[in-house]
Amino acid sequence: MLEALKWGEDSGIVLRLYETYGVSACTEVRTSMGGEAIETDILELNNYGSVDLRNLCLKPYEIKTILIRSRG
């Protein structure tokens, strides 16, 4: 479930997603924006590395915050 879509604190666009059924799940997130997708903490202070939006997996009830930085 996409809970939030907002401008990032410093740059880019932030997606906040969470798993609602209590099971592990994978999904694909499509965007026309392009750029690098980085998993970050909920406050957008710490980066945990790049993520593949074509295969984004969540654990039961997990919340993920993804920052998409545009190229250029």
Image (cartoon, rainbow, N blue to C red):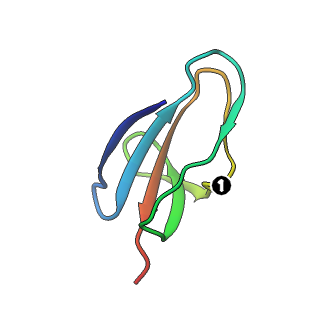
Q: Secondary structure at mark 1?
A: loop
- On the image, the x and y values in percent for residue 42 come to 42, 39
Q: Amino acid at mark 1?
A: Arg
What crowding class fits label 1: few (fewer than 14 Cα within 10 Å), some (14-19), or many (20 or more)?
A: few
Q: Is residue 45 above or below residue 50?
A: above
Residue drawn 48% across and 71% down?
A: 35
Q: Is residue 9 above or below residue 3?
A: below
Residue drawn 33% across and 44% down?
A: 5
Q: Which residue is mark 1?
A: 54
- On the image, the x and y values in percent for residue 24 come to 72, 26
Q: Quadrant of residue 61?
A: top right
Residue that lies at the very extreme toward the right in this rendered image? 24
- On the image, the x and y values in percent for residue 70 come to 40, 72
- The quarter of the image holding the C terminus is bottom left
Residue drawn 65% across and 15% down?
A: 22
Q: Is residue 59 above or below residue 72?
A: above
Residue that lies at the very extreme toward the bottom in this rendered image? 72
Q: Is residue 61 above or below residue 40?
A: above
Q: Quadrant of residue 32?
A: bottom left
Residue drawn 70% across and 19% down?
A: 23
